[in-house]
Amino acid sequence: MIRSTLQGRTLALSLLVFIVCGQAASQIERPSTSFAAIAKRVEPAVVSIDTKSKIVEPQARATPAPGASDDIMEFFRRQMQQRPVYGVGSGFLVDKTGYIVTNAHVVSNAANITVKLDTGEQFQAKIVGADEETDVAVLKIDARRELPFLKFGSSAKAEVGDWVLAVGSPFGLAKSVTAGIISQKQRETQYASAFQKFIQTDAAINPGNSGGALVDASGAVIGINTAIAGFGGSGAQGGSIGLGFAIPIDAAREIGEELIATGNAVHAALGVNAQTVTDGERDGAQVNNVEPGSPAASAGLQEEDVIIGIGDREIRSSEELVVAIDAYDPGDTITIEFVRGTGSQTVQAVLGQA
């Protein structure tokens, strides 16, 4: 009888513990795997861009012999101008007054640019400035009201493996959102200029995504979706196979501000090719090669030197080196701190123009 009572009490206690623990467990909020909140916050500031190119005269062709089978078609071909080319792309608002960042190649040779907002409203846009070297352009629309805009994140602080969303209008399909991770940073490709070291991502990027926003898990923009490697080629060819490239926002932001201020972007040059290195104690940009006759050569920089400072700015990566140099004008004198062997040194260099 006593054993039975004890067993009953033990069972009751176990049930009580189970119920209490069950209630506690049900109250624990599980982490969400949905990006819905980020998408809702970002989408209103991402725009679709439709362009119509300038009409150009067709190239002259050899005159066919009289009586040739295609002489009539050639006659009509010469009478007609080449039809304008229509294109689609993406962009995103960066302030409430209507400034939009996109790719320079999206609006290249455009005679007419139409921007469509998340609300469905359409506006004619003007090009404030475009820089082919970095493939960054700034547009302006006049909505006569305050507009939603994206906040800037830091591409330098983003890490490989971080979640990202690519937002834009692939194939003209507005408000498309794809998710992935940062696959690599400071990626050089055969399509890049000297000023471009891309963020690589497996978030699906397709033709029409160019100029759209790559945002982090907080909704802050860390890159401009720019290029793909896909079936049938790159750029506007083929489709995504998980190799997408975005311009880091740290570099693009400075270019954008310069375009807004002056309409042009002038690039200073040091004359080195560098890569990011870390030895566990001090990160920097290691010089791979020095261009003969360049400011770097005149200053005495050598291969394998690790640049760790430009002026009062710490350099922890090759991306930060590009951004730091691009903040100066050609002709400016800068102080370079670098490590050679076991010691650090400083030299001065007069920057050239890219």
Image (cartoon, rainbow, N blue to C red):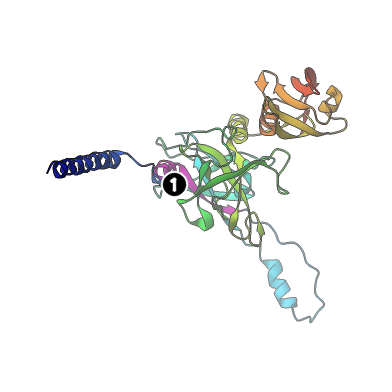
Up the image or down, 253 lies above or below 73; here it is above
Horizontal and vertical percent for residue 147? 42, 37
Residue 252 in the image: state x and y as whole percent: 61, 36
Report which quarter residue 143 is drawn in.
top left
Q: Is residue 255 above or below residue 47?
A: above
Residue 337 located left or right of residue 28: right
Residue at the image point whose x is 40% and y is 50% from the top: 120
Residue 241, given in percent of the width and then of the height, sits at 60, 57
**Which span is picked out in magenta?**
37-53
Left/right of residue 255 with respect to residue 297 in the rendered view: left
Q: Nearer the viewer, residue 146 or 335?
A: 335
Q: Residue at x 60, y 33 (%)?
A: 156
Look at 77% across and 29% down and name the residue there: 270
Determine the secondary structure under disc 1. Answer: loop
Tell me the quadrant of the picture where the N terminus can be found.
top left
Residue 186 visible (yes or no): yes
| The C terminus sits in image quarter | top right
Q: Residue furthest left?
A: 1
Q: Nearer the viewer, residue 33 or 173?
A: 33
Check residue 47 for magenta coloring: yes
Residue of label 1: 117
Amino acid type at image mark 1: Leu
